[in-house]
Image (cartoon, helix red, strand yellow):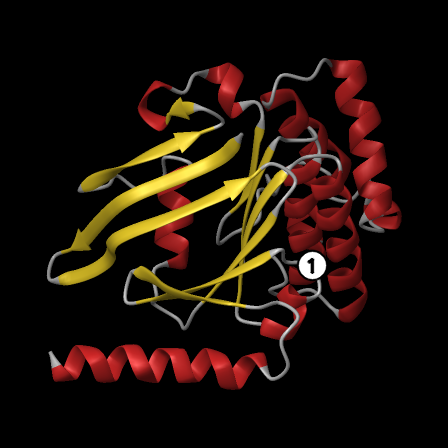
Amino acid sequence: MTALAVAGLRKSYGGLVALDDMDLDVEHGEVHAIVGLNGAGKTTLMGSVVGQVELDSGQITVLGHDRADCGRSVWAKVGHFIEYPFAYPELTVRENVVAAARLHGLSGTDAGRVADTWVSHFELDRWSDRQARTLSLGNTQRVGLSCAFAHDPDLLILDEPTNALDPAGVLLLRDAIVERAQSGTAVLVSSHHLDEVARIADRISVVHAGRVIGRLDPHAIDLERAFFAMLHSFDAGVRAS
């Protein structure tokens, strides 16, 4: 079953077109990566999926439900990290992850258990009792990722999740994504780093000018060259039309 499907998405901000007839889908157990330059529409797409962006037109289906009809039971199965980490500055690291799990329907006991699991996975144990406001940017990023993974979601939406992470954090995130996908979670992840997403992606879609303009083979050599060739070809076609 398709976990996420978007069709014909359009969104404009004044004269700026952010999404231009965007189509995309993600299957359960699949890591679908989207890559593109700044302003390509990646964050707008992801924000629209979770209801942060109101579309001009188009349809989004989340775990078999029209987004407009998704209730608490559906959103409880979705984890997301979009632009900024989820972290209440006055709460400790552990309290933040517990809060995220509780917001997704876990009981107090279960929330505490999964919080300990993900705090440990992202190697935040030594900061577990520290307020989030005192953390470095990289560790705040790890807290936000722990919150996104804490409730074992069926669908994960991750927007540039490696931002601010050191190499050790990138490896921990990679392991977490692969583990969740192997457990059946559908993962939509955006990145600027082609070499990094190629290590984990089943599919790579190139987003440009608010639409998907092509696909890259994760196993191909010299992905950067193929990526920029695709962009130049698209732009040349637009100028010629």
- Residue 149 place in picture, x, y as percent: 68, 38
The residue at which mark 1 appears reads as 200
- Residue 33 place in picture, x, y as percent: 54, 57
- Residue 4 place in picture, x, y as percent: 46, 37
- Check the image and report above or below for 199 versus 99: below
In the displayed structure, does residue 160 sit left or right of residue 98?
left
Q: Nearer the viewer, residue 21 or 139?
A: 21
Q: Residue at x 12, y 57 (%)?
A: 14
- Residue 69 place in picture, x, y as percent: 35, 18
In the displayed structure, does residue 72 sit left or right of residue 131?
left
Q: Nearer the viewer, residue 86 or 32?
A: 32
Q: Residue at x 64, y 81 (%)?
A: 221
Give the crowd class for mark 1: few <14, some 14-19, many >=20 residues within 10 Å. some
In the displayed structure, does residue 125 sit left or right of residue 231?
right
- Check the image and report above or below for 204 versus 11: below
Quadrant of the frame with the C terminus:
bottom left
Q: Which image quarter: residue 93?
A: top right
Mark 1 element type? loop
Q: Residue at x 40, y 58 (%)?
A: 42
Q: Residue at x 50, y 34 (%)?
A: 2
Q: Nearer the viewer, residue 147 or 214?
A: 214
Q: Which image quarter: residue 30?
A: top right
The amino acid on which the numbered mark 1 sits, given as a three-letter code, is Ile
> Disc count in the image?
1
